[in-house]
Amino acid sequence: MSVASVPFDQRDGFIWYDGALVPWRDAKLHVLSHGLHYASCVFEGERAYGGEIFKSSEHSERLRLSAEMLDFTIPYTISEIDAAKRLTLEKNNLTNAYVRPVAWRGSEMMGVSAQNNKIHLAVGVWEWPSYFDPEQRLKGLRLDLSEWRRPDPATIPCRAKAAGLYMICTISKHRAERRGYADAMMLDYRGLVAECTGANLFFVKDGVIHTPTPDCFLDGITRRTVIDLARRHGIEVVERHIKPEELSDFSECFITGTAAEVTPVGSIADWTFTPTGITHQLMDAYSAEVQPKKQAA
Ligand SMILES: Cc1ncc(COP(=O)(O)O)c(C=O)c1O
């Protein structure tokens, strides 16, 4: 059996759990945990390249902010979380890996109110080369259009990377996969183009990049990195509201995310794209950017 098909609770290695490394299979929580029942749980998705986690502190900061938006405080500082992630990587002998910190409310109270629950933090790491099938990635992904929409920011803490917000992402991605697509594009509550189930969206028209304003979905760390890279390459980037009917005007499309990195999109429902020039330029630029920076002599 390849490692990828071994269930996540049956692997070997170490998981950092509330301040100490524990054997992988012992990193358990009780079924009566608030995080499980009421989604009082936040997490991060990060990647290490050549032994260094890309933008580690930005992710740790977002994790702490996500928790604050759910009204709890992670009892570790950003540098303590960064150190925990580094230690977990080292202890598992991984240099190129996915890194998953997760924080949740424990079991002290089991109701909507959970004022006194202990806040737990764990970090798992594993090898995870490509989020999408490499062959599909090369050709450009085929995306479905989700039936679910990103909610109004007045109804959810939309800037938090919170477990509860992934409920509609999983339903959307399952439906897309059943229908033969790699993923789905989600519109927002206004019917504007939003994002994919785990990545941000970009389009190209006449050499200019257009991407939806992140006013009701996650402003990805990869998204911001790619915008910065594009501008450094002299490519204009416009953040604006995009209507789905405009998709027929775009020549290229790609998605960005820690897991997805920069991935070309060939089609979304009946809209087709030829992700060539700018998409390939940014795929290369991103691959170079994530490599550990050599210390200046
Ligand atoms: C819903 C959603 N949008 C966007 C992103 C991209 O965020 P990032 O680039 O910070 O990984 C992710 C991935 O974490 C995500 O899950």
Image: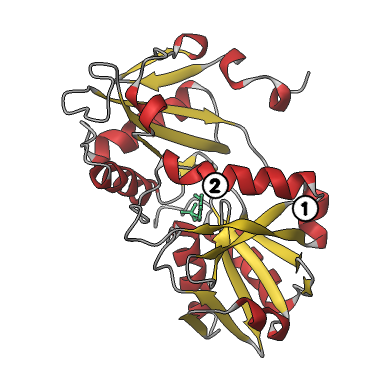
Within the image, what quadrant is residue 203 found in?
bottom right
Q: In this view, does 46 lie above or below 295?
A: above
Earlier in the chain: of badge 2 and badge 1, it is 2
Question: According to the image, label 2 marks what residue?
Answer: 168
For image coordinates 67% across by 56% down, the residue present is: 184
Q: Residues within 10 Å of mark 1 (few under 14, many from 20)?
A: many
Q: Does residue 47 appear in the picture of this structure?
A: no
Q: Where is residue 125 in the image (x, y as percent from the top left)?
A: 51, 30
> Residue 248: where, in percent of width, then height?
72, 82
Give the x, y percent position of residue 72: 22, 37
> Quick check: 268 above or below 103?
below
- Tell me the kind of residue under disc 2: Ile
Residue 269 placement, left or right of 105: right
Badge 1 element: loop
Residue nearest the observer in this picture, 106 or 132: 106
Distance from disc 2 to disc 1, alpha carbons, whole Å, reads: 17 Å
Residue 22's label in the rendered image is none
Reading the image, the residue beneath label 1 is: 181
Which part of the image, by quadrant, shows the C terminus? bottom left
Circle 2 packing at 10 Å, graded few (<14), some (14-19), many (20+), is: some
Residue 280 seen in render? yes
